[in-house]
Image: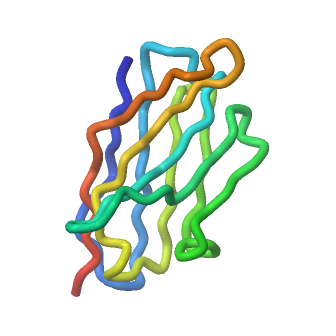
Amino acid sequence: VQLVESGGGLVQPGGSLRLSCAASGFTFSSYNMHWYRQAPGKERELVATITSAGGSTDYVDSVKGRFTISRDNAIDTVYLQMNSLKPEDTAVYYCNARGQWRYRGLNYWGQGTQVTVSS
C-alpha cells in the first residue's frame, strides 16, 4: 500500500498550489479520502474530505471557499486545489485513506508534502 503526495512547495500569499496523492495497493474507490495538515507545534488537523465515489465533500471552516478536494477513481488519485493561500496555511499536508464497507477499519497515510506560504 502506498499514498504518495506531491505538489507542495513555497508560494506567496494569495497564490495557489495543487496537491496530488497517488494511491496504489488497495481498492481506492472503496475508500473515503482526506487531506490533513500539521503546522509546527500544532496538532494534525483535518482539512478536507471526499467520499469514495466523490459525491460528497467537506472542509474545515478556515479553508471553505479557498480549497477544493477532488478525486479521479480511474487513476486512483485525490487532489487538493488550494487558492488564496495564507501564511497560516503553512504546514505539512498528509493524504489519508479510510476504508468503507468490507474495508472498514483500514486506514493508510502518506508521507506528507510541505506547503510554505510566505513572501
**Which quadrant of the figure has residue 29?**
top right
Residue at the farthest right position? 55
Snapshot colouring: rainbow
Query: The C terminus is located in which quarter?
Result: bottom left
Q: Residue at x 60, y 73 (%)?
A: 61
Q: Residue at x 39, y 78 (%)?
A: 15
Q: Is residue 96 above or below residue 10?
A: above
Q: Is residue 104 above or below residue 62?
A: above
Residue 12 at what x, y percent from top left?
29, 81
Would residue 10 be found to the left or right of residue 76 on screen? left
Residue 39 at what x, y percent from top left?
28, 66
Q: Is residue 16 above or below residue 51?
A: below
Would residue 14 be found to the left or right of residue 118 on screen? right
**Which quadrant of the figure has residue 93?**
bottom left
- Towards the viewer: 37 or 53: 37
The image shows a total of numbered marks equal to: 0
